[in-house]
Image: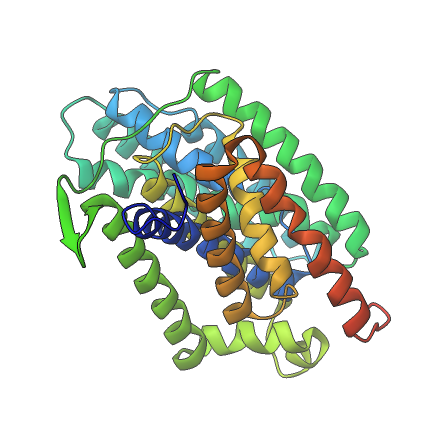
Amino acid sequence: MDIFDPSIFPILTADGLTNGAVYALLSLALVLVFAVTRVIFVPQGEFVMFGALTLAALQQGKVPGTLNFVLALLLIATVLNVVRALRAGDGRAAGLSVLWAALGGGALWGVTHALAGAGTPLWVQVLLTLLLVVPQGPLLYRVVFEPLRNATVLVLLIASVALHLALTGLGLAFFGAEGSRTPAFAQGNAQIGGVTLSLQSLLVIGVSALLMLGLALFFGRTLAGKALRATAVNRLGARLVGIRPEAAGALAFTLAALIGTLSGLLIGPSIAIGYDSGFLIGLKGFVGAIIGGLVSFPAAAVGALLVGLIESYASFSLSQWKEVIVFTLILPVLLWRSLSTRHHDEEEE
């Protein structure tokens, strides 16, 4: 059957837009993290995996392993904060750090054990999933990348790859080798222009569009968003006007974790997510980010949508080659970027 058959082409296009919307969110997160911290954040897809599998565990009435992971990260981050405060002679800051960590960790442990049982409403499980996975973003930044903030991009990339491998292993330990699929947030179908689309696909596209709009408003209208943009444009200049790079990095990783977790919740009903699924999903977002040169949010979003469409068309006519076709896209883009972009010495502080 021809790919351009009127009965097939709109369905493939809708499927491509649905997946492309998720890839677009991930590409925006990758561009944000790189622009603010210079970290090519390879484990972005692991937030997708943790989000989907944490919700799946909660729906089975289990306490997800991500609880122990976030508590361990909180403990390590608190130790680092206490050591830094004591070296600066600020005992009060060290005490407050321990107090807030104890209160936050205890509250998270109590809430998770209280709500992890079967029968908890889906929206509560979604909120609990966000509580368990999103804090991992700033905590991973504090533990892994903040101590390396003055390192070269290559060193940061090596740390990023190592973190990806560690998180994949933790995913296997927490959730096992079997993949899981979460139930759809919306049941049924809708007819649009003669094409039948599932309400779940429409929900994914709609929520993704709202998130992108929210990010645009955040960066354009809020002081924190403008601080992130300033840091992305010129880290040294941002520091000179009082923007702390550590706070900007933590905020960028928080947004990246939020976007990754929401992407996992959205895509979880469509495909079975396993402990090793995050890398491939994140890599497709990375292709979009590369198309945007790791600097342009609109170009990255458009590139990611293109990746989704090509993947959908290729899966119909050349399913065994679809991954090859998608990732081969990156080669001409890199060549074009290499020839058209002026090279600068690595900036820094």
| Along the viewing direction, whichever of 337 and 220 lies nearer the viewer | 337
Q: Is residue 74 visible?
A: no
| 250 is higher (above) or lower (below) than 131 | below
> How far across and how far down the image is residue 335, in percent?
77, 61
Q: Quadrant of residue 242?
A: bottom right
Q: Residue at x 65, y 30 (%)?
A: 165
Instruction: Specify how the rendered protein is coloured.
Output: rainbow
Left or right relative to 340: residue 231: left
Residue projecting furthest to the top = 177
Q: Residue furthest right?
A: 345
Q: Residue at x 45, y 52 (%)?
A: 309
For the point 22% across and 30% down, the residue is 115
Q: Is residue 202 visible?
A: yes
Q: Is residue 162 left or right of residue 77?
A: right
The residue that appears at 53% across and 54% down in the rendered structure is 253
Q: Quadrant of the N terminus?
A: top left
Rendering quarter of residue 250: bottom right
Q: Looking at the picture, how far across and down is residue 95, in whole percent?
A: 51, 48
Q: Horizontal placement of 332 versus 168: left or right?
A: right
